[in-house]
Image (cartoon, helix red, strand yellow):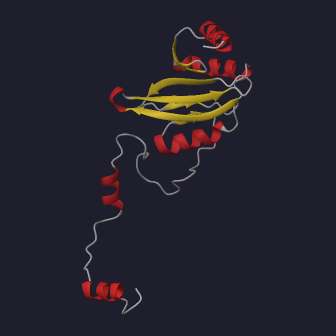
């Protein structure tokens, strides 16, 4: 691990009382935090070179009844990457916004709200990005059943095959 990453880890340990540190390689680490300490750690990281929010996403741990919110941060100065994650209760899917730290987070939070149903306190722009007329549970939750949804929205239809017409198209007698 680089010296700059060691410094970051030591400072994070001073900020967060509970942190699990996983070294992925010499330039990449993952920090697993208690949800109450995420904002302080993200603020520290942003102020110390990790100015680029590369990605914000969610993992649905349905068996644990948890969502894991994942932030991937990058430092252009050092080339280091830090993954920050926390788990929240799946039944009370709420977390605080980070759009005050990274304004682009507002779009990630909208997408996460749309596809997982997590609300972000402080972000009042939760209108849909993609699913404008969606009326079911969020589609990236593991308990969403796409087959059931399709059957409900698009009932089975019976089609009669016209083999004579198809043969004429194949032979070139008629154009489609």
Residue at 33% across, 48% down:
145
Residue at 25% across, 79% down:
160
**Residue 103 versus residue 37 in the image, above or below:** below
* Quarter placement of the C terminus: bottom left
Q: Which one is in front, 72 or 168?
A: 168
Q: Is residue 124 visible?
A: no
**Residue 13 versus residue 109 in the image, above or below:** above
**Residue 145 versus residue 161 in the image, above or below:** above
**x, y (%) of residue 69?**
51, 29
* Quarter placement of the N terminus: top right
**x, y (%) of residue 87?**
47, 24
Q: Which one is in front, 57 or 113?
A: 57
Residue at 63% across, 18% down:
41
Q: Which one is in front, 24 or 32?
A: 24
Total labels: the figure holds 0
Residue at 63% across, 34% down:
54
**x, y (%) of residue 135?**
43, 53
> In the orientation shown, which residue stands out farthest toward the bottom?
173
Q: Is residue 108 visible?
A: yes
**x, y (%) of residue 12?**
62, 12
User: In which quarter of the view is residue 66 placed?
Assistant: top left
User: In which quarter of the view is residue 168 placed?
Assistant: bottom left
97 sits left or right of 155 in the view:
right
59 sits left or right of 79 in the view:
left
140 sits left or right of 21 in the view:
left
């Amino acid at each position: 691990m680089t010296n700059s990453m060691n410094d970051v880890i030591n400072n994070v340990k001073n900020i967060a009382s509970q942190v699990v540190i996983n070294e992925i390689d010499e330039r990449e680490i993952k920090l697993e935090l208690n949800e109450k300490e995420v904002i302080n750690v993200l603020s520290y990281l942003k102020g110390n070179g990790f100015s680029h929010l590369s990605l914000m996403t969610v993992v649905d741990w349905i068996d644990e009844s948890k969502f894991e919110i994942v932030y991937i941060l990058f430092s252009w100065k050092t080339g280091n990457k830090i993954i920050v994650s926390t788990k929240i209760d799946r039944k009370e899917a709420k977390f605080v916004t980070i759009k005050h730290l990274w304004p682009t987070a507002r779009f990630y939070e909208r997408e996460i709200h749309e596809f997982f149903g997590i609300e972000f306190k402080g972000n009042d722009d939760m209108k849909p990005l993609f699913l404008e007329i969606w009326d079911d549970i969020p589609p990236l939750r593991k308990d969403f059943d796409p087959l059931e949804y399709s059957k409900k929205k698009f009932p089975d239809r019976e089609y009669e095959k016209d083999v004579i017409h198809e043969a004429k198209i194949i032979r070139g007698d008629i154009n489609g």
